[in-house]
Amino acid sequence: MKVLLISTYELGHQPLHLAAPAGALAEAGHEVRTLDVSVEDLALESVEWADRVAISVPMHTAMRLGVALARRVKERRPDLPLAFYGLYATVGSDDAVGSIADIRIAGEYEEALVEWVSGKGSDAVRVELGRTRHALPARDSLPPLGSYAKFRDRGTEVAAGYVEATHGCRHRCRHCPLPTIYDGRLRIVAADIVVADAMRQVEAGAQHLTFGDPDFLNAPAHAIRTLEGVRSEVGDVSVDVTVKVSHILDHADLWPTLRSLGVRFVVSAFEQADDRLLELLDKGHTVTDMSKAVTILRDAGIDVRPTWLPFTPWTKPAHLAQIVRFVDESNLWGSVDPIQLAIRLLIPDGSLMLDLPELGPHLRGYDPEMLGFQWEPADPHMDALQQELAAIVEEGDAAGTSDLTVMRSLVDAIGQRTGIDMPAVPDIDVAPRLTESWFCCAEPTARQLNVGS
């Protein structure tokens, strides 16, 4: 069977979620082509070549773009079997998504995708959580690493690879899409597979590796074992990981070891600088915990890159000011991507947010095109401010404006619209980071919505 795998967006990384199923399908004897329309033109000849098409949808932006792309594919070949696979595959009403896709597979999708391509299994929607053997990702047909985000440190940029040592998460943060599928479950990718995939990327030029696990310390022993394997096989390569605030604190003794194994920065979901809002999101940490996490990582020689969720139904001007002041008081100006000050809560199908009584008064129904439930803020001025901040970020991104310049514009806008005195954004060195500054829980930009067109 001839299979075309398509990715629309994977946070600027060379798409693991093309490489992983490509490896599994090739093992099963199928002929596979891959297409990443974030860096490649939509190859219509590949659509004509394929017996089946499967679109990777690991995040909200990818699903929004994937639905639009699937419609184009179906316009050209209405009878071509088409699948969505990945974390967001089951998002969307039957009218908006189910009428386009023959099958939607979420969770541990590899074996189910192989079954579908092989003509087995007839369920239109599948959530796969079984423990499985993951194939070695096949990256030969993907665009080179130079086409993707780089690791930048002190003005130097190097190619960055991307791996995942685990899927799912042991936690159930209320706003996160993971509990909708994994419901607190964790699935391990064998260390030898992760190390072999890392080796291939280093051989292809990567000098930095992103571990994209939702939380790298969900399985600490596996995390250390995997990093030790990478260090043993590929030598001195820098690393970034994502870790929950509570895990930073719970495993404070591990950070010197993780630094010795190459960890340069940690992405951590701080989300808010108000304990009540953190409680509504069920984050499991406090503002004090966030400050402690910053100190623990800095003491180990590791930078933290916090993510924020500033716009919720309950956000008031004072909450935005609290985030800005936390960034200022914690000396994090060089560690926050501008998009983080403009992110608005997404509520997809099945979100645990829908079980929260406090959300009820704000809900305004489901939007099948936006693939989520719409809501209005308690403060009617907050939506206009969010849209203004998002426009500043998108314009700065398109123009290549420096992060600190964009951040100054954002802070100025917050101060002007709220009447609250804001701290000045200082001239400061940008902390180690990847050059892709967008985020999985941000709405797609106008530029992204034109992908593949």
Image (cartoon, rainbow, N blue to C red):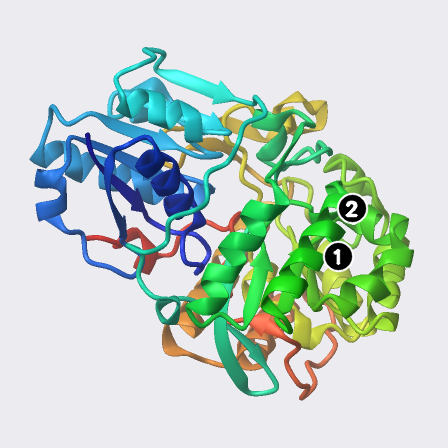
Q: Circle 1 sits in a helix, a strand or a loop, which is it?
A: helix
Instruction: Report the front residue among 217 and 100.
Output: 217
Residue drawn where x is 73% and y is 44% of the image: 222
Q: Quadrant of residue 53?
A: top left
| Residue 283 % position (x, y) | 76, 41
| Residue 268 % position (x, y) | 71, 55
Instruction: Report the front residue among 448 and 342.
Output: 448
Residue wearing tag 2: 220
In-image side of 23 versus 230 (left or right): left
Q: Of callouts 2 and 1, which one flags the residue occurring earlier in the amino acid sequence?
A: 2
| Residue 52 % position (x, y) | 20, 30
- Amino acid, disc 1: Ala
Residue wearing tag 1: 318
Residues marked 2 and 1 touching at CB (< 8 Å): no
| Residue 164 % position (x, y) | 57, 48
How far apart, in angstroms, are the residues tagged by discs 2 and 1? Answer: 37 Å
- Amino acid, disc 2: Pro
In-image side of 27 versus 151 (left or right): left
Q: Quadrant of residue 351?
A: top right
Residue drawn where x is 25% and y is 54% of the image: 450
Q: As displayed, is residue 49 above or below residue 181?
A: below
In-image side of 72 versus 143 (left or right): left
In this orientation, does residue 65 appear?
yes
Q: As displayed, is residue 313 above or below residue 407?
A: above
Residue drawn where x is 60% and y is 78% of the image: 408
Q: As displayed, is residue 289 above or below residue 389?
A: above
Q: Residue furthest top?
A: 122
